Amino acid sequence: MTFKRIPRVGIGGPVGSGKTMLIEQFVPLLSQIGYRVAIISNDVVSKEDADRMRRNLASERGLMPESLVIGLATGGCPHTAVREDPSMNLSVVEDIESAHNEELDLIIIESGGDNITTTFSPALADYFIYIIDVSGGDKYPRKRGLGIENCDLLVINKIDLAPYVGADLKAMERDAKLIRKDKPFVFVNCKTGKGIKEVADNIVKNVLFELPPKKNEKKTEKMT
Amino acid sequence: MSTRFSNKIDVIDNNMKHHHAHDPTTCEDPLIDEVSMLQLGDSFFPTGMYTTSSGLETLFYDKRIKTKQEIIEFITVCLQYQIGPADCAALSNAYDFAKEQNISKIIEIDHILFSMKLIKEIREASIRSGRQLLNCLLSFVPDNNLIASYYTSIKNKTANGTYPVALALASNSLNIKKERACLILLYGFTVSVTGAALRLGMLQHFEGQQVIHELKPIMGNVLNNNITRHYSQLWQFSPSVDLVQMTHERMDSKMFIT
């Protein structure tokens, strides 16, 4: 029995760049439209990110079932788990697809924090978001790296910290345009939600192709 | 490169020119079978085995294993009391039934082995690796009816896809001899735990190769002791290792799947 492929977004980036918080910010926007998502979180040393997203998005806000936030240990090789040998991720994706094909619109795969050469295997992810933050230095876009150069959407996070760490946002913008040519990038602040709608809009347009949700029931957040 | 092998490549090139496509698995050249063995036995082959430590991570954090010799002893226990009499013997039997195209017996062995894997994460890792092995294999050996039938049974949830059984079918399809298929299994397990020790910082890179070298005779003995074991006589008994693996399964912070 074969199942229709559920669209998949891969999210990679260095440790602490804001991958988990980015997901926590855009998933509620997708849920407001009615899209149902599952999250696979690859982690380097713990399942802390998966536990946090499960608590925040599922248990407390009721935006998804707890069982659809899955943590995966990567044997200390997060880039291998999403690029060279994505077997374990693919297996979890297949399990999700077989059990939730009728209602699920999107699978998000978060890579463990890694270096700027991280990319996703096209067999695993249809769309690749790479996130960096300004506190790593405004040199990041200029330094290239496969992730920064090749991703479908480059997200530059923590823009509020720029004046405190001496990062020049104009230089980052100029370098991102130069390196990525016509491919998009967006400045965000995951703490305040600034720029997040643009990320969600990109996913709706380029991954979900603006199709309506499979089950058109808008998820409303639990009252806390 | 041997002359014979380079000649074979010339033949393959010519075949490709004349037939547009060529299936190396239909060549009756033992060298190709040997290369197939290297391919399935290589950690580059995508089965996700690098994500497991078989409980070594717990022993490391608890400081119960510190030396190279203790790592060798841990792997030896796993090979002799878990992998050998269960996985290796299951592979051997499944391989024989693959030769007979007996899918029902292959599935029976798959169920027996699945039921013997007491640790949930190890059970799940085995079937994930098995399924991904078959998935990958079908991309370059697409016309093997037995594998297609087993894969369909997995999809229909009437089979599990345990790694040793999947490896038996894959090896048979690539003309890899049974003994060598068993060695792929034993070697792959040894390398996955040694690799975990390396990444945990318990070994440096030369020591990792020394561990593998010192375990070669153990792999040979385990192979000889289990390759003729009938599937009704599969066993595994390593309660201390089981407890370590159960403890690891429940660890909040860890690098590896158990």
Image: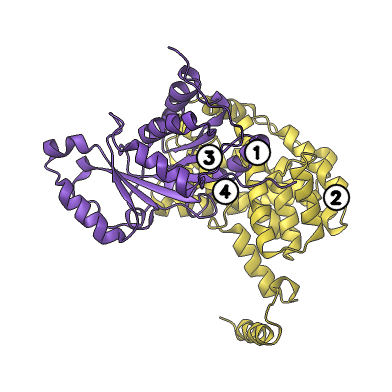
Chain colours: A purple, B yellow
> What's the mark number on residue A101?
1
Quarter of the view holding residue B67? top left
User: Residues at marks 2 and 1, common chain?
Assistant: no
Secondary element at tag 1: loop
> What's the mark number on residue A116?
none
Q: In this view, does B143 lie above or below A39?
A: below
**Residue B54 coordinates in the image, percent (x, y):** 56, 37
Mark 4 vs mark 2: in front = 4
**Residue A69 coordinates in the image, percent (x, y):** 52, 30
Residue carrying label 4: A87
To which chain does the residue with label 1 belong?
A
Residue carrying label 2: B103
Secondary element at tag 2: helix
Describe residue B68's horizontal placement relative to residue B185 as left or right: left
User: Residues at marks 4 and 2, common chain?
Assistant: no
Task: Say if residue B197 shows up in the picture.
Answer: no
User: Residues at marks 3 and 4, common chain?
Assistant: yes
To which chain does the residue with label 3 belong?
A
Classify mark 1: residues with Cα within 10 Å, few (<14), some (14-19) or many (20+): some
Q: Nearer the viewer, residue B258 or A181?
A: A181
